[in-house]
Image (cartoon, rainbow, N blue to C red):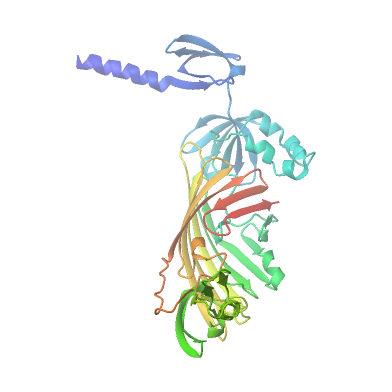
Amino acid sequence: MLKKSIIILIILFSGLIGEEIFNLKDGSSIKGERVSEDETSITVQTSFGEVTINKYDLVIKEYIVVLKSGETLIGTKKEDNEQYIILITQGIGEITLDKKQITSIKEVKLDDSKNDVQKDNKAKGLFGLISGTGIVDNLISNDRDADFTEGQEQLISLFADPTAHTLKRSTLYMSGLSFGFGLTDNAQVTTKWSGFFYGDLNLRLKYKAYSSGNWEKQSAFAIGVDYHQRWWPNKYKWVSGPLIKTVEGIDKTYYYGGWTSINSNEITSDDLELNYYCSNEQGYYGTQDECLAADPNNSWEEDTPYINLDGGADDPDDELDYMVELFGAYTFSKARANLKGQITHTIGARALIARNGDDWELFPRLYYGVDFDITPRFKVISMIIYDQYMLEPYQGGFFSDGEELEVSSEGPIEESKVLPVHLDFGFIYAFNNNFRFGIHFQQPWLGFYWKF
């Protein structure tokens, strides 16, 4: 009985090994064992009987294989194992490729590999900018099930934080806030052109000092320096203290507290504004004098005082101008199973050194980020950041620069603790080889750039 069971299991297992899945152009999928084959058809034994498939009706996957030597091959895979791939090409026939020598593999439709030039010409044609970005064509495309080893976008930064990757030689990059250029395959220079409008000459140089591996597993390390001549700070500090204001000839003490830009001017009693509420038919008036002028005999009461930051405490002075930042990043990637792209990890550190008056201050920042290839065009990015001088957008870190200073006449204001650990999450979508768009949780929220 035991021998009979073993024989049955062997027969069943042998049948499973011999089974293949045949995808047809009409969307059908047939699973079975290949019985025979000729130049035009394949006979398959299925669970519902023996069927003959016309080879013309089969979906044949074709791949573009890029080698480390710079050569590109297009063909169908005959065999794929851990060491090598056997590719059948139209021009040179069957060729065996060592996986260690392969930079990337990407599935393409048969028509795509032959019509790239036509697509490029179409992108430059009738619809101008819209067609040029490929938005119309690519939004309706579906590459979710495509095979690929690397996505179209190898990130040079995780939103604002550098990775170890650099632009390729002679590649021009431009975004809504900056532009850059690949000096060599391992060195790039970028600049935030938006700073030019207020006299900030700035340059960021990044050099990839180390790189190894292939598409299955690779790692890189880069270092760099960022220089700003007139830096507009995006770092914040907690400020608090007492202010004395004379009200009706009597000195009264008020207390303030809140987060503001690190180069804000010192807060004085002149920045403290008092408003009053008049309980008469004319309602609210902004100052005590206005209340008294409207009706000296009517009652009025002090409303919530506030700090006036216009031209005052929050008006950045010119003392903090020069800024130098040193940074380093280590990036390593590993291929996902079944040719579905990569998972890439980046660990980085930034040491920002800025002049504040006669002093130089250090602002460290550590970060870890991971990006997932979902499709060849679509990446999901997640980050964790340690930065004790950073505010979340809802805490006034982007719009107000500390305008949410609290004022009280009751007593000192307790410091509002801000967790120095921050999270970010978002995605980047490549409409084509040139245009990318991204959105994420931290400011500036939206990003887009062209790469030529």
Describe residue 290's horizontal placement relative to residue 330 as left or right: right
In the rendering, at what x and y percent does residue 42 appear? 54, 14
User: Residue at horizontal 43%, vertical 20%?
Assistant: 19
Q: Is residue 41 above or below residue 452?
A: above
List the single residue furthest toward the right: 126
Quadrant of res 311: bottom right
List the single residue furthest toward the front: 297
In the rendering, at what x and y percent does residue 215 appear? 53, 45
In the rendering, at what x and y percent does residue 389 appear? 48, 70
* 326 and 425: which is toward the camera: 425
* 155 and 98: which is toward the camera: 155
Count of marks overlaid on the render: 0
Quadrant of res 4: top left
Q: Residue 344: tell me if it is visible.
A: yes
In the rendering, at what x and y percent does residue 84 appear? 51, 37
Q: Is residue 158 above or below residue 287?
A: above
Q: Is residue 237 above or below residue 268?
A: above
Q: Is residue 76 above or below residue 138?
A: above
Image quadrant containing the N terminus: top left
User: Residue at horizontal 60%, vertical 43%?
Assistant: 67
Quadrant of res 313: bottom right
Q: Residue 265: tell me if it is visible.
A: no
List the single residue furthest toward the top: 49
* 252 and 128: which is toward the camera: 252
